Image: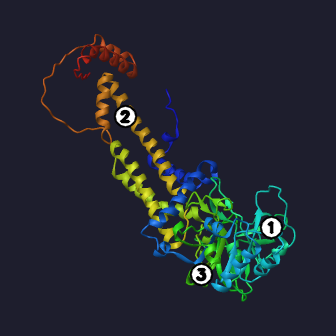
Amino acid sequence: MSKRPISVLNIFPRRFLWLILVAFSLLMALGALRIMPGFFQPMAHILDDWRTRYSWHSPLAPEKKHQLEQRVVIVDIDERSLVEQGAWPWSRQKVSQLISTMIDHYGVSGVALDIVFPEVKEDDIVLANQLAREQVTGAVVYDLLGRNQAEVTSGLPALPAIRWVAQSPVIVGLPVTTNHPKLMPVRAGHITPLFDTDGSIRHLPPLACHRLKRTECRPLLGIAAFMGLIASSSLEVRPGQGLLSPAWQLSINDSENATVVQVPIDEDGALTVPYRHRPEDWLAISATDILKKRAQPDLLRGALVLVGATALGMSDVVYTPVSPVASGMEPHAEVMVALLDNSFLVVPQYGNYLAGALLLPLIALLAIVVSRFQTPLQRSMVYPVWLLFCWLYATLVSLLAYSKFDLLLPLTPFTLFPVFASVLLGSAELFFATREKNGISGLLAAYLPKQVARKLAAANHIGAGMDTSVDASRRMITVLFADVRGFTGIAEGHKPEIVAKLMHRIFSEMAAAVVGHQVGVCFGW
């Protein structure tokens, strides 16, 4: 006796197999970035950047995102400044005048310098007096890539007090560039970005720690400048609590140890830059307008000022989700605004579980729709429509979470799950449909010519199963009555399987003469 080949599709019932394929698709979508990060990470970056840019135009976006930001002002050493004030580097007297004008004349609350002064000059004492003011925050560049650059070992400002929890994630490196010791401010933050695989800046290290002394950490420039606004401030790193919380949190505390701001940190120790502003949303004032006191005082009074350069040859042009050609000051400015609002974008530590839960309604919807449409033609339309609906659902859910709750839901599972499920379930449907069609065709071919059997099987395959309805019609037919000589003896002396094969061969040869004329043939015996 011949045995049918054993396969997974034959072992499991059809509904159970459907559940297995859906579960497998869900697990693959949730784990895609961990299983194949090199393949799926570029797609994740594209999706995240799309969400960032589209949120500006979304009806869910708050109006404040489209207003000019005036609490953080960019003082730009631009081309016009170089034309009017001379080529860079400027004299120490001129840089000192720029800082004193911002603080004394315009009354800014803080000055964060996104520039360094590593060289020694004769009039350093003039600039040193201004850098020593409590409103000023200097910059330190860290080597986070281990490029064996010379370490700055002395003269750095004191590090803030930080309370740690065991297993806290840290980003380590070495301080390699800053002001020379005679121009060191009382407070400094690092200005070192983190570049993703495509060269874009989506994350920044909230703390840059010494490679050999991991408890000695310097905060980001924006965080250090914000801490300068708080008396006796300190930092604390602790794990996040709750389903929607980040993996870790960096708390900025005041003198009474009360939390002023919480900065979300992911499991790698980085913060996600909250790109909420378009390039035209920033208030940028040319440095020459500050030196000549042409800027309106109301624009700067009480503001937190970020000083940097965009002039050709001295600017750090970077690639961000907002623009392929952006100033290196913009990520720091975004962080400073988020600190003032105490509103950062949070990557939930259980984001994959949350995404899985949000995908369950889509699975239920697919189960209901598939159960209502039984024919192969109907089911062939179900999966593409369902896939498009899933992507629309993901768009609405992710934008709502982003705009209303500052949550960065993982978009990769929402994108990949309907694709995986449609491919696997569609392939299973095709297998079952082909198997049923072949089964009907094989059954009819035992008694009918192959051409007739295929035609009947194709006609019946349009429905969910064998069409047994009566379709009466009046036609002219020709009937041939023929007998097989010795059939009774053959039937009595041989097995039924042999007799069936014999009759099938006889019928096929008899039908060959008329099938070529497109004439229908039906046999009975």
Between 326 and 411, the one lying in front of the other is 326
Which percent across, then down, holds residue 273? 61, 67
Residue on which the image places disc 1: 118
Name the residue rendered at 56%, 65% in the picture: 408
**Circle 2 — which element?**
helix
Q: Say which of 53 and 241 sits in front.
A: 53
Q: Is residue 86 shown above or below 149?
A: below
Residue with the mark numbered 3: 300
Q: Nearer the viewer, mark 1 or mark 2?
A: 1
Question: Which quadrant would residue 142 be assigned to in this image?
Answer: bottom right
Residue furthest bottom in the image: 256
Residue 493 at x, y = what percent? 38, 15
Q: Looking at numbered disc 3 in the image, what kind of residue is underneath it?
A: Leu
Return the disc, 3 or 2, that comes first in the chain's sequence.
3
Which residue is drawn at the image coordinates 26% and 13% (left, top)? 513
Q: Is residue 299 in view from this perspective?
A: yes
Instruction: Give the answer, above or below, for where 268 lies relative to 126.
Output: above
Q: In the image, 294: left or right of 64?
A: right
Proximity of marks 1 and 2: CB atoms separated by less than 8 Å: no
The percent position of residue 428, horizontal first and vertical second, equals 45, 42
The residue labelled by disc 2 is: 437
Which quadrant of the figure has residue 175? bottom right
- Of all residues, the one furthest to the top in this rendering is 485
